[in-house]
Image (spheres, grey):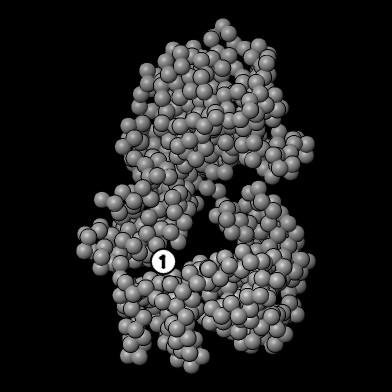
Amino acid sequence: MEKTFVARSDTGIHLSNSPTQTVGYKVVDGLEKTYHSTPLLSLEKTKDMDSIMRFIGSKQVMLMHKLDGLTMKLEYDNGVLIRASTRGKGNEGEVVTHNARAIEGIPGSIPYDRRLVVVGEAYITKPVFEKLRDTLRDSTGNKYKNARNMAAGSVRCYDARACATRGLVFSPFSVIEGLDEDAASSKALKLLALKRYGFSPCEFILANTCPSEKAVADTIAGLRSSAEKEGIPIDGIVISYDDIQYSISCGRTGHHYKDGIAFKFEDYLYETVLRSIEWAPSRSGELSPVALFDAVEIDGCEVSRASLHNLSFIKALELMPGCRILVSKRNMIIPHVEENLDRGVFAGSIIPTNCPCCGNTVRIDANNGTETLHCDYLGCAMQKLRKFVHFVGKKAMDIEGLSEAILEKFIIRGWLKSFTDIYSLDEHRDEIVAMDGFGEKSWQRLWDAIQLSRNTTFERFVVSADIPMCGRTASRELRRYFNGDISVFEKALNDRFDFTQLNGFGEALHRNIHDWFAVEENIQLWKELQKMVTIENKETSATAEAAGNTFAGRTIVVTGKLEYFTRNTINAKIESLGATAGRAVSKNTDYLICGENAGSKLEKARVLGITVLSERQFLSMASA
């Protein structure tokens, strides 16, 4: 998309890239930080048309291209561009004013004598990207993976001359300050008013009130088609309320404003060739299949492997090495094999008859119609290694320094036969110090971490035992119910306690717990480990309830990508408040804490009328 730019001084508008405006491109030493008084937040996202229709309701909405580039904010005072900045993390961005004149669509001056703040997207069209991708390199010296990355890197160039060669285009999608005299109540009218000042707003359509689902779907399809024809990079459609005052009344979370939602397109499929299927035994003995295929680039990352789940999945797709397959990144995160384009050549020879690790015969287990492969040899080295990796992991005993590679070396040398052997590694101190990569300091750090793990919690101890399906969430519920007292838990086991009465416990988990403790070796390990560690015997929920905490005794589920917490730390915070960190939304759920890219849990919470909180709302209520 090539255009000629001229300075339109007769109207008071000076467009970027005009001959009179591009003399003397600036070079800066770095990018200054700038604070956004109005946070430039992200959008809630969905792939579900039902969610879109519920959002629209009876309000008039705008449907607009969701441009795939870098969000920028432009600030004008008395008609002069005084600052151009990136979105950054929402509250703080970087100043890139020096590059403004190198980007098409950013006027340097406009005939507007008040303050105007415009937010939009700087992007690179697909034809321009294809032309530049073989010649440009990013800051690491590699080719740019996609147009989005190239746009982001170009906007942030220190040298405006370099930025000017990238073909960047800016399209505004929001006016957050100014133009009230043109349109005080309509976002659409404000965007249209920008045209008088030399801007080319992002393409949008103002829908009729209460549109049908077909009308909305047709509009989305039309906008997608127009972007494709123009080579404009988009990754979805934004739907937002047109009425400005109503939008303001919707409020916001810590992550997004509630007056808009992004409809994300389906996951793109990429064709490649399956080269082999790799099988590896897990700590339970189940062989996990992984597809190895010719690398494809998805969302800026090279992908060359993906889980194949189980034997039934492989059979259903009739997968064989050499087949052409379609792969995607589901929800832009998880690589997945979607289809086999060369069906009809499947052969049973693809199914291994022996464990790739120990060589023992494997069996096929059919459970609820799903076939899986299992290695039942308890001495399988890989199974043993995986069990040790689980035991020392962060959710279990949390022994820093015992990586999988180090554990493997210790196991091969015969130093680790049981978990309890970890606490006797000082018997091999001199040999460990002499190992490659070790020394006195490394050994001391490792031994200190082992000693630190001796003081553990009820839930960590239970997780480390590796009872099937009894992970961190289930162990927390056990800790809550049995007041963190191992002896009370053990008495319940002897009395054939019905675990299905606990929150989130089904018949399978109930059976797994009793079956695990029916094995003499497991009971012996359980007792031996208790001799090695001290388990905290305290119940936090009673303290929290006594303090009158809002969340005490409640069940809280978390979904989406969080801004302030990892999943482990927020679950720990929930537990510290005397609440239960649930795994799935149900009628027993009291609150749903919602982050970015929330999916089916959010939809179910809305259906059930469960209170949805942002992280900030959760923290505010927790400290009240």
Q: Position of residue 544 (x, y in %)?
A: 26, 63
Classed neighbour count for the residue bearing mark 1: other residues with Cα under 10 Å, few (<14), some (14–19), many (≥20): some
Q: Position of residue 325 (x, y in %)?
A: 71, 62
Q: Nearer the viewer, residue 428 or 156?
A: 428
Q: Position of residue 395 (x, y in %)?
A: 48, 68
Give residue 584's quadrant in the image: bottom left
**Left or right, 502 with reference to 161:** left
- The answer, for residue 515, to whether it is visible in the render is no
Element type at mark 1: loop
User: At 58% from the left edge and 39% from the top edge, which residue is drawn?
Assistant: 68
Residue holding disc 1: 583
User: At 65% from the left edge and 54% from the top edge, which residue is drawn?
Assistant: 269
Q: Nearer the viewer, residue 388 or 185?
A: 388
Q: Amino acid at mark 1?
A: Arg
| Vertical position of residue 453 compared to residue 73: above or below | below
| Vertical position of residue 319 compared to residue 174: above or below | below
